Image (spheres, rainbow, N blue to C red):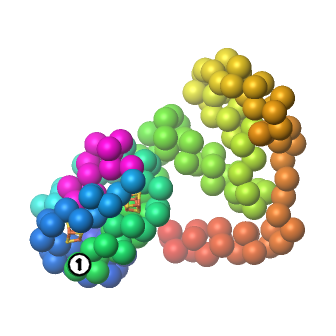
Amino acid sequence: MDVNFWAEVNRAAGRKVSHCYQCGKCTAGCPVAFAMDFKPHQILRLLQLGRGEELLASRALWVCSSCHTCSTRCPCHIDLASIIDTLRFWARRRLPSSLRRGMPLFNALFLRSVRRYGRVYELGLTVQFNLKGRKVWRDVELGRFMLTRRKLRLLPESVEDRAVISQIFLAEKSEEQ
Ligand code: SF4
Ligand code: SF4
């Protein structure tokens, strides 16, 4: 990995990753650690060992819900949630093909929906995800059940001030460059 990668990781961390002493409090508090291939403290350990490349193909990046529990609990004040955000940016740059399936694809479609409407259009997101994943009939029964009980909207709804949402995405894009 090049120097920019390590500079960005350390900037996101707010502290040097070497300060992590593997206490595991981040993993203990993480609500989705059970579904991660690399647990939060293991992400730090791999970064300490200079093995950032391995993390870019990791499932953990896309499982993370950015709840910031790990960052809040860390006794060393390492901002792991922001590190994971940075790793996602790098995964998009380095592994664009992996974004065409599974959780990275879901993440990309989710963000596209938020960018367009200011909130998630759940029905559209599900249909797109299943079409791109070539599982056209997946969730059809569940979707019908939820539609009849008005738990899903047939048409998208936009927030009033979409300009604010656009600004957030523009700011994120300029940070990525
Ligand atoms: S809580 Fe902080 S110090 Fe402890 S393992 Fe996690 S990142 Fe390292
Ligand atoms: S921000 Fe991600 S890694 Fe940290 S506790 Fe939340 S879900 Fe887990």
Residue drawn at (63%, 54%) of the image: 111
Residue drawn at (77%, 39%) of the image: 151
Q: Nearer the viewer, residue 157 or 1?
A: 157
Instruction: Give x and y (percent) for residue 154.
Output: 85, 38
> In which quarter of the view is residue 57 placed?
top left
Instruction: Give x and y (percent) for residue 74.
Output: 27, 74
Neighbour tally class for label 1: few under 14, some 14-19, many 20 plus, Cα within 10 Å: some
Q: Amino acid at mark 1?
A: Pro
- Locate residue 130 relative to residue 38 in the image: left or right: right
| Extreme residue toward the front, this view | 149
Q: Nearer the viewer, residue 106 or 2?
A: 106
Residue under label 1, please give it.
Answer: 75
Q: Is residue 60 above or below residue 173?
A: above
> In which quarter of the view is residue 64 placed?
bottom left
Q: Is mark 1 within 8 Å of ligand 1?
A: yes
Residue drawn at (85%, 53%) of the image: 157
Q: Nearer the viewer, residue 127 or 174?
A: 127
- Locate residue 153 relative to residue 87 in the image: left or right: right
Instruction: Give x and y (percent) for residue 143.
Output: 73, 28
42 inside magenta stretch: yes
- Locate residue 84 relative to residue 109 in the image: left or right: left
**Disc 1 secondary structure class:** loop
Q: Which residues are magenta?
A: 32-43
Q: Is residue 30 above or below residue 14?
A: above
Ligand 1 found in image quarter:
bottom left
